[in-house]
Amino acid sequence: MGTNNLVFLEVIEWFDDTGHEMVHRIPEQGSGEIKYGAQLTIRESQAAIFFYKGKAFDVFGPGRHTLKTGNIPILTKVMSLPWGFSSPLRAEVFFVNMKIFPNLKWGTRDPVAFRDSELGLIRLRAFGIFNIQVIQPVLFINSLVGTQGVYTTEEIEDYLNRVIVSRFNDYLGENIDTIFNLPGRYDELSEGLKKILVDDLSHFGLELSSLYINSITPPPEVQKSIDDKSRMGVFDDMNKLLQMKTAMAMEKASETQGEAGAGMGMGLGFMMPAMFSGMMKDASVTNKSIQPETQICPDCKSSIQKEAKFCPYCGHQQIIFKQCTNCSKNLPPNAKFCPRCGHPADEKPTPKKCSNCGAINLPDSIFCNQCGEKN
């Protein structure tokens, strides 16, 4: 045991100077002696988890906490300290950064296969950004962080990138027949892809707050085909524009009176919906600002307050220690099997092997990233 383990902690707090740290353990190496009456200070964008003998026992929210028996009821009950916590406690504190981490990048390192209904098998590159936030700090530590003293966005970005690319390939294959239909649909594709990824990230205690597709790039020869088709579309649009202008000129020539009044009436007709829309939007923002923050109970799907530790409708515990990899049921810390489906608690999901080319893809993937075949 090194000298770094012999630390007497009286004031426990943490500041993230980098903007990239998601989890920081105090002390970073080994465990420390936390004195009775030590001061634990947690900022608004943080949560703190107490670990004792390798297990999480208590979660603290923002504020200043004096570590006494009355303030750590869960930890005290589990340990059953005969001396009433009058001696130093050997433990670790994990600080979790609960803020939104923006501008994380995702993209295809190698082009992914896509079967186009007009062009056949082509390979596409895609790039974009996404934002994530920790919403279940204990589950995040137990599933991804482990015993690391510091955990940053760089360490999770590569894994999430592979998940996003795989789901992107599936979603594109199910919703786009040909890349000629891609222009103007980036926002729609981004929103649909985000909804698919919500479930993937929830197993790690993470929330995907937003995701954007910046570009989807086919090979150069395919780009030339798209440009040629776009030019043909421009000529069609010009013909339609000339026809519309001709019809408008004929209508104007046939008018003999009431031109100014009709124009003003039409202008007001266009303006009124926009005015009412702005008023309704302002009212919606005002009502939203006074509503308390809520979250969805993962068991009964009821809307409850975000700070609640238990669901008032079904009693489900909101602090997740571990989830079943089969049905996503919240598991007790020492569970061997899922109480809902009986699945082994520590069994990992099996990667899917493509029946056509043998490439390994993520579990539940629909299309192969290597050959584009549907599994």
Image (cartoon, rainbow, N blue to C red):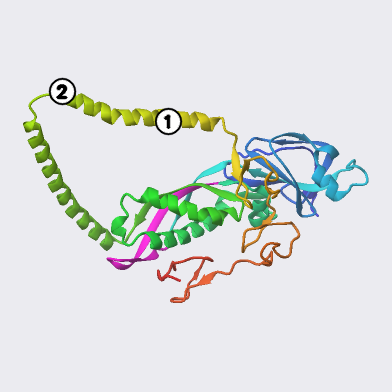
Query: Is 197 drawn above or below residue 248 in the view shown?
Result: below
Q: Earlier in the sequence, mark 1 or mark 2?
A: 2
In this rendering, position of residue 288 left or right of residue 117: right
**Along the line of sight, the residue nearer the viewer: 336 or 300:** 300
Q: Are marks 1 and 2 in contact (CB under 8 Å)?
A: no
**Along the line of sight, the residue nearer the viewer: 298 or 262:** 262
- Residue annotated with mark 2: 260
Q: Is residue 114 magenta?
A: yes
Q: Around disc 1, counting alpha carbons within 10 Å, would you say few (fewer than 14), some (14 to 19), or many (20 or more)?
A: few
- Residue 298 place in picture, x, y as percent: 62, 51
Instruction: Classify the position of the N terminus by image quarter.
Output: bottom right
Residue plotted at (76% across, 54% down) = 55
Residue plotted at (53% across, 53% down) = 198
- Residue 59 place in picture, x, y as percent: 72, 44
Q: CA distance from mark 1 to mark 2?
A: 31 Å
Q: Is residue 109 visible?
A: no
- Residue 84 place in picture, x, y as percent: 90, 42
Q: How many marks?
A: 2
**Along the line of sight, the residue nearer the viewer: 6 or 297:** 297
Q: Secondary structure at mark 1?
A: helix
Residue plotted at (60% across, 34% down) = 292
Q: Is residue 130 magenta?
A: yes
Q: Which mark is residue 280?
A: 1
- Residue 276 place in picture, x, y as percent: 37, 29
In this rendering, position of residue 180 left or right of residue 22: left
Amino acid type, callout 1: Met
Q: Which residues are magenta?
A: 110-132
Amino acid type, callout 2: Ala
